[in-house]
Image: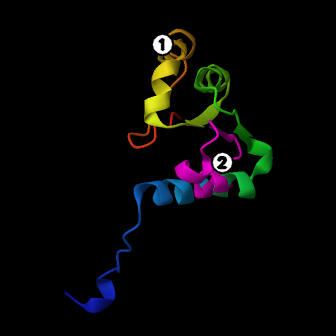
Amino acid sequence: MSEKFIKKIEKIATRDAYGKVLIQLGKENKDIIVLDADLSQSTKTAGFAKAYPERFFNMGIAEQNLIGFSAGLALPVANTAKVLAKSAFRQYLCGVCHGQSLRTDKEFGSIS
């Protein structure tokens, strides 16, 4: 195979890739809102916050509020540490699962 068809693959941490993709998605879709539970440096959502400050909300160390708040948004991306997200599971079941589509990030417990 010709070398011009071989792409160089850059290896980066999952959370770094996640942060970069969030910024790109934010550029493509103005409806995306990112919420974080005071972990934007770890979850790599700080880049989104810098690029789109009007669509980024730091909910503080309040995972239950983070999930409840995100339930009312059109395209939420809620981020927290997986171990801390356990406290918000009831909000996820009771408030969010009634018609809201959410996806979870396996590494940091992000919910979008």
Examine the rendered structure and indicate whether residue 68 appears above or below residue 82: above
Q: Residues within 10 Å of mark 2 (few under 14, many from 20)?
A: few
Q: Amino acid at mark 1?
A: Leu
Residue at point 73%, 57% (across, down): 50
Q: Where residue 38 sits in the image (x, y, percent)?
A: 64, 40
For the N terminus, the quadrant is bottom left
Q: Count every numbered label the image shows and give the total.
A: 2
Q: Where residue 63 sits in the image (x, y, percent)?
A: 59, 26
Residue at point 49%, 53% (across, down): 18
Q: Is residue 44 visible?
A: no
Mark closest to the chain's N terminus, 2 or 1? 2
- Can you tell which mark lies on residue 29? 2
Q: Amino acid at mark 2?
A: Asn
Residue 11 placement, left or right of 77: left
| 49 within the magenta span | no
Q: Residues within 10 Å of mark 1 (few under 14, many from 20)?
A: few
- Residues at marks 2 and 1, CA–CA distance in whole angstroms: 27 Å
- Can you tell which mark lies on residue 93? 1
Q: Where residue 34 sits in the image (x, y, percent)?
A: 65, 41
Q: Residue furthest bottom?
A: 3
Q: Nearer the viewer, mark 2 or mark 1?
A: 1
Q: Nearer the viewer, residue 4 or 97?
A: 97
Examine the rendered structure and indicate whether residue 34 appears above or below residue 21: above
| 32 within the magenta span | yes
Q: Nearer the viewer, residue 108 or 84?
A: 84
Q: Residue furthest left?
A: 1
- Range of magenta residues: 23-46
Q: Residue furthest top?
A: 94
Q: Nearer the viewer, residue 99 or 43?
A: 43
Find numbered disc 2 in the image and state the secondary structure of the residue it sits on.
loop
Colour theme: rainbow
